[in-house]
Amino acid sequence: MSHGTGHAWQPVSPCGSGCLPSRPDRVPAAAVWGRWLALIAVAASSVLLPVLRLLPAGPRSSAHRVLARTALRGIGIRLGVRGGAADFGGVLVVAGHVSWLDVLVLAAVVPGRFVARADLVSWPLLGGVARRAGVVPIERDRLRRLPDTVAVVRDRLAAGETVIAFPEGTTWCGRSYGRFRPALFQAAIDSGRPVVPVSIDYVDASGVRTTGPSFVGDEGIGASMLRILRSRGVRAAVTVGPVQQPGTDRRELAERCEWHVRRVTDVSVDMTGTRDGLSWSGHDLACPQFRGLPRPRRDHPPVSGHDRGDDRGVRHRGQRVVAARIG
């Protein structure tokens, strides 16, 4: 979600209310109240998170998964997982960003410490959970603080913790998406720790991708929560991708991980350009923001500079890879 920019390089999404379903399928009011109570109960149970840190890594991860999956069931979100969801240690997990719901979904699959927007701690219900979970705050409108955040993530990874980040830097509707910014990938390179790309797709009861859970435009967190709690039949389809070795080039690593995140969907994987002055890198023809534009594809993963024996940027099929200017 984006509300203006603090600097010229701050990630901005063009997605807004026009991306949301016009006539979503809703549950009865009684079910909505029940889901609100479940969400409040989950927030209250977050007081246990500091205690869980005292447990060994295995039981701690299992407990986090149970709490997150219980929360998802309580608010009516079904979860499907494909790929290895084993306990990772000392890895950077990266995923595309659609909604505040992504945090619960990823915690239910690959628990870890999240890198999250600094103002998250002030949000109702979720803010208390974020504080107790010990998120790594990132101040998106203060570019000079970014190296400090990268250093914190590096140290967490080196200490054997799993850190989860959303390299797009903001939320998109799920039918269009932003490119992965490379800055946080430097933490994996500096610590010598691998990266695990994870795809999250939200689908409706018929199995069709839906933008219903997306947190975009000028919508507030309260309105977004209510809309999701009213939704019927939403399922989070998660695919855990193959572990990626860090190599030596953060831009190449970011592109490689983005390819693995996008390849499991029918969304285009290699469009790079600008729309209304905003940086973007992919779209689905069903997205109102990009309807009518062509969709090029890449059918093979990028070849890393590390694998080629150099650390140059990569080019494929004549398409230019645009390096992020942040980091």
Image (cartoon, grey):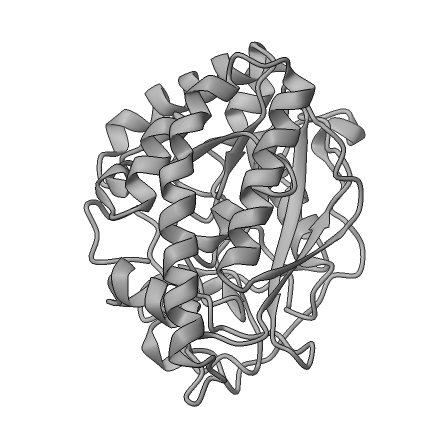
Quarter of image, res 183:
top left
Number of numbered tags placed on the structure image: 0
Q: Residue at x 37, y 42 (%)?
A: 43
Q: Is residue 193 visible?
A: no
Query: Considering the image in quadrants, where does the N terminus appear?
Result: bottom left
Quarter of image, res 210:
bottom right
User: Does 176 sit left or right of 197 as displayed?
Assistant: left
Q: Is residue 173 visible?
A: yes
Q: Residue at x 34, y 68 (%)?
A: 226
Q: Position of residue 244 (x, y in %)?
A: 73, 33
Q: Position of residue 197 (x, y in %)?
A: 66, 42
The vertical placement of 31 against 262, above or below, is: below
Q: Could you say which is closer to the camera, residue 248 or residue 119?
A: 119
Query: Considering the image in quadrants, where does the C terminus appear?
Result: top left
Q: Residue at x 77, y 24 (%)?
A: 309
The vertical placement of 296 against 321, above or below, is: below
The vertical placement of 234 against 315, above or below, is: below
Q: Position of residue 284 (x, y in %)?
A: 57, 75
Q: Could you say which is closer to the camera, residue 223 or residue 196?
A: 223
Q: Position of residue 138 (x, y in %)?
A: 33, 33
Quarter of image, res 254:
top right
The vertical placement of 162 against 259, above or below, is: above
